[in-house]
Image (cartoon, rainbow, N blue to C red):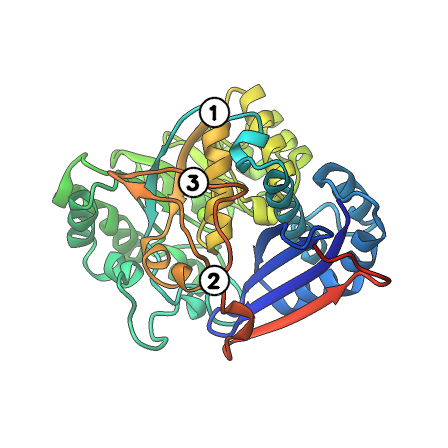
Amino acid sequence: MKIVDIETFRPSGHANVLLLRLRGEDASLVGHGETFYAASSVEAYIHDVVAPILFSLESADPTSAVAALTPYVGYLGSGVETRAISAVDIALWDLHARSLGRSVSQVLGGAVRDDIEIYNTCAGTGYVQGPGGQSVANWGLAQGAPGPYEDLHAFMTRPGELAEELVEAGIGGMKVWPFDPYAERHGGRRIDRDELARGVGVVEAIRAAVGDRIDVMVELHGLWDLPTARRIVSALDGLDVSWIEDPIRADHLEALAALTADSPIPIAGGETVAGAASYRRLLAADALDIPIVDPTWTGGLSEAVRVARVAKDHGRPVAAHDCTGPVSLAVCTHLSLTQPNALVQETVRAHYHGWYADLVTELPPIAAGRISAPPGVGLGLEFVPDLAARPDVSVRVSQRPGPRSVA
Ligand SMILES: [Mg+2]
């Protein structure tokens, strides 16, 4: 099918969120995509570079379109080019599935499970919603009115109570990142004894409050060097931590492999890594126990499926990311339901019960600590009808040149 329209949407309160909608020559057929970080830069790349290529294709199926869009420079990382292609690839899968009257899970070969266990990433409503990247300054703790679940503030100040709330809500796991302020303070090169004790104290308080009734994951955001990461891993040993995530940047492959070899706690990571080939190198080096993948960053759903298969071929599970947007959560859910080695689906209840519903008509249902795909064709969601008209949403449109047939 030819693509005739590309629309991008940037909601002003969410500086990093970029939503994308493709329209096929049959105007009733649309596909939805999304990516996160540097939204205006990705948007410019989509309209300046991606659009002319996409419009030149007689048939924009995901596989052929991504082959045509893969750039000479920029394919090796999860930079602007790859994030743009990720959003487009996801939208093409949505459109492709809709054109067949099927769900994305069905066109991927079918679901192997009806639902999958979730865990709660303990972010708050404003987490990384300001301009800029993943840093303590962009935690959003002081931004505007508090949302329904300010779980980041809660894990830093009352982790035991938060764990009790989550257990009560039937959520089986929680992820926290109490060491980040100290990493920023010292450039990841050291951690003082009292800082180490405060970070470990968050997990100790969770265990004291709820015992073993919740899984605990500790996120380190790739901020540490090898010796300091070793100190943190060692200090967390004995607290039944399910995984330590991204202790060291994924491109420091030998250091990550050395840590993983010694660690008594499984090492997870990879959400910022682009492309299955990069995961293959990480897994061949035994640098990760639990690969994490984000379709909106790694190159799209096409690439995320390849990542899941590479993980499976290396005897590893795969865990899908989401802390970034509603389309991301939907596409990750379809991925998790269709990949035999999917372990668990990340969710953020502050976003799920907060701003996600401002942007889309449906979210993947969550019940009894498990998530399933929204019913319906494609990804199972659409953008809210008034999205393009909203004063808080910036819209940019590119249209295929020449005569258009409108159904
Ligand atoms: Mg993460």
Instruction: State the CA–CA distance, disc 1 to disc 2.
Output: 33 Å
Element at label 1: loop
Instruction: State the CA–CA distance, disc 1 to disc 3.
Output: 23 Å
Q: Given the image, on which type of amino acid does mark 2 rest? A: Val
Q: Is residue 277 above or below residue 70?
A: above
Q: Given the image, on which type of amino acid does mark 1 rest? A: Asn
Report the residue marked by disc 1.
341
Closer to the camera: disc 1 or disc 3? 3
Give the residue drawn at x 83%, y 58%.
52
147 displayed left or right of 405: left
Marks 1,2: beta carbons within 8 A:
no
Image quarter where the N terminus lies is: top right
Picture quadrant of residue 107: top right
Report the residue marked by disc 3.
375
Picture quadrant of residue 84: bottom right
Instruction: State the CA–CA distance, disc 2 to disc 3.
Output: 17 Å
Q: Given the image, on which type of amino acid does mark 3 rest? A: Pro
Q: Is residue 224 visible in the rendered structure shown here?
A: no
Label 2 residue near ligand 1, CB within 8 Å: no
Callout count: 3
Report the residue marked by disc 2.
384
Q: Position of residue 399 (x, y in %)?
A: 76, 64
Q: Residue pushed farthest front?
A: 407
Q: Is residue 82 visible in the rendered structure shown here?
A: yes
Give the residue drawn at x 23%, y 50%.
201
Ranked by sequence position, the earlier of labels 1 and 2 is: 1
Number of other residues with Cα within 10 Å of mark 1, as a class: few under 14, some 14 to 19, many 20 or more = some
